[in-house]
Amino acid sequence: MKRSTIYIALLWLCQVGYAQQQAMFTQYMFNGLVLNPAYAGSHETVSATALAREQWTGIDGAPSTQTFSLHSPVVNQRFALGLVLLHDEIGVTDQTGAYLSYAYRIPVSENIKLSFGLQGGVTFFDARLSEAFENDQVGIDVSESQGNFGFGTYIYSDRFYAGISVPQLLENEFDRDNPDSDSRIVRHYFGTVGYVFDLSRSLKLKPNILVKAVDGAPLEFDVNANFLIHDIVWLGVSWRSFDSFDALVQFQVTPKLQFGYAYDFATTSELRRVNGGSHEFMVNYRFGSNKSRIITPRYF
């Protein structure tokens, strides 16, 4: 196989043992349920989001991620349910997960809600490691499924949000029959915060910060600033530590429908030389006939 594909496979092996495996997203501020189960119901209507990310284009075996999330309030708006489907492929490895979320929301004031969320589900894992090497005896294929659960808290209004979450609490081991294997899920801790400022009648500014902590890896930051023009177009820039500078654009096509796109410029010189950047596409649709419910929370 090509050297770049083998490089991606070895990169994944290092990540599985000691660092991050959970997929990253540039448009995390519009895809909150994937990071935090307490986000469920925050759109105050039935909301569906699909996102596709192609990372490091031009490199064989580069990460490719697709997610679909669906969530809505139920039972007098105090409870909310959500569903997350996730597919993540890198090199010769493939992960597919399905997780259900439950959130209980407490009104703190007229405009502020505090939400506590739980999620549980299963991840199907497949690593065709023998395909990454010419000598089939070097690689050992692994195919397993693992259950997991997580929790989070989320406080928000129509202008502000903050959350803390641990989407996967269990540090499950893969390839448990192999005593030499150190392949396991590493627990991730996420913190998010954002606020919307009025700069003028037609221009708003929304800064967002994502902090990620993972055992065995440096603390990571994703700092973003989005400008909303005439309540229709979002234009934004981001910086992700140790990784990239990013450009974002979102279009509020209708009060219910939103499209988004992000492009990442790698800051690592080695990656810049061999890849064409990363592309991320997002679409969100919010069902329901109550227009005020749809417009107000669309900032997040």
Image (cartoon, rainbow, N blue to C red):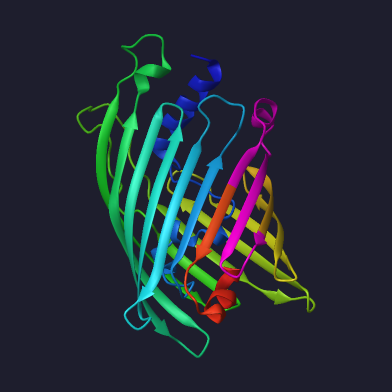
Most distant residue in the front direction: 289
Q: Position of residue 85 (x, y in %)?
A: 38, 50
Q: Is residue 199 left or right of residue 219?
A: right
Residue 267 appears in which quarter of the rendering? top right
Q: Position of residue 168 (x, y in %)?
A: 35, 53
Q: Nearer the viewer, residue 211 or 106?
A: 106
Q: Residue at x 46, y 25 (%)?
A: 10
Q: Position of residue 26 (x, y in %)?
A: 59, 51
Most distant residue in the left direction: 177
Q: Is residue 204 left or right of residue 63?
A: right
Residue 115 appears in which quarter of the rendering? bottom left
Q: Is residue 91 magenta?
A: no
Q: Residue at x 28, y 53 (%)?
A: 121
Residue 273 appears in which quarter of the rendering? top right
Q: Quadrant of the C terminus?
A: bottom right
Extent of the magenta region: 251-280
Q: Is residue 13 left or right of residue 102?
A: right
Q: Is residue 252 magenta?
A: yes
Q: Nearer the viewer, residue 208 or 30?
A: 30
Q: Residue at x 27, y 26 (%)?
A: 180
Most distant residue in the top direction: 135
Q: Is residue 154 above or below residue 111?
A: above
How many labels sit on residues? 0
Q: Is residue 239 above or below residue 242?
A: below
Q: Position of residue 218 (x, y in %)?
A: 53, 47
Q: Residue at x 25, y 40 (%)?
A: 145
